[in-house]
Image (cartoon, rainbow, N blue to C red):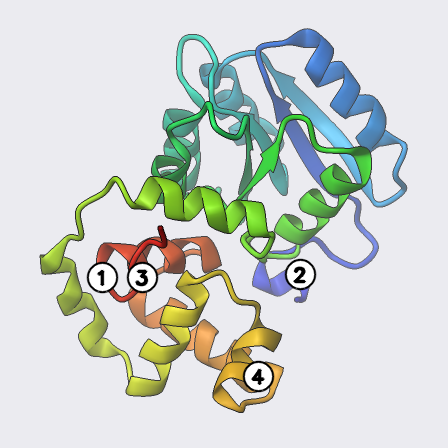
Amino acid sequence: MNAAAGSPSVNAPIKVLVADDEALVRSGFKVLLDLEEDITVVGEASNGHEAVERTRAARPDVVLMDIRMPKLDGIQATAQITETRGLEQVRVLILTTYDTDDYVFDALQAGASGFLLKDAGPSELLHAVRVVAAGDALLAPRITRRLIRQFAARRQVDRAAEKRLAVLTEREREVLALVGQGLSNHEIGNELFLSPATARTHVSRAMAKLGARDRAQLVVIAYQTGLVSPGP
């Protein structure tokens, strides 16, 4: 994806803001990220209010956002960031603890582009930052699909939202359903006998028609409309 589409340019480092109420966690992330030539930490925040304010000031490409923070939690901070004019290209990567955070689906609805377990290894963290900065949603890993299914199962389908799907072609509905199941463009292509490039085109068109800011929002819509049913 080129810079005009919202991702960092090839030569510019990925700008990251770290938001966590634990100073030791912030320091650890900062040290690790700053060691990479293509990543730089442009700010830190110890609560949700600071995260919003410093995101507005620093305009990072990615915000590493803890869910549980004082003054303003990570979900509310994510919503404020994604709804702020001029911050449309900022991507929020939620830090979560599997089996303890009950807010994963809420974070998706607030505009988060993906999730990272707080006990993730260094390579996982770096991969997550690069994936989200490139404009993709971090939804492919098996554990993330399990999280989405677990928490989506607690939500009732919004039947009125089904009308939103009327703008899609039948092929785009098929693609949206597969996106909702966590499939990549390559996997969607294999499922529908399409090239990955064609699958990506259908995904992009569905995003444009539905007003979704990224792939993660397509997952939310797929569940809200009942196009995808949560797994057991």
Q: Nearer the viewer, mark 2 or mark 1?
A: 1
- Residue, disc 4: 190
Residue type of the residue flagged with mark 1: Gly
Task: Examine the rendered structure and indicate whether residue 173 appears above or below residue 7.
Answer: below
- Give the spatial CA distance, label 2 vs label 4: 29 Å
Three-letter amino acid code of the residue under disc 3: Ala
* Crowd tier of the residue under label 1, counting other residues whose Cα lies within 10 Å: few below 14, some 14–19, many 20 or above: some
Residue at the image position 46 percent from the left and 73 percent from the top: 204
Can you tell which of label 3 and label 4 is closer to the viewer? 4
Nearer the observer: mark 2 or 3; the answer is: 3
Decide: few, some or many residues near mark 3? Use Cα within 10 Å; few <14, some 14-19, many ≥20.
Answer: many
Task: Pick out the residue farthest to the bottom.
Answer: 193
Query: Residue at 58% of width from left, 64% of height from top?
Result: 5
Residue extending farthest to the front is 232
SS of the residue at dot 2? helix
Q: Residues within 10 Å of mark 4 (few under 14, many from 20)?
A: few
Drawn side of residue 6 relative to residue 170, left or right = right
Query: Left or right: 16 with respect to 220?
Result: right
Q: Quadrant of residue 180?
A: bottom left
Disc with the residue nearer the chain's start (1 vs 4): 4
Displayed quadrant of residue 59: top right
Which element carries disc 3, helix, strand or loop? helix
Q: Which residue is mark 2?
A: 3
Q: Which mark is residue 222?
A: 3
Q: Is 110 above or below relative to 220? A: above
| Amino acid tagged 4 | Asn
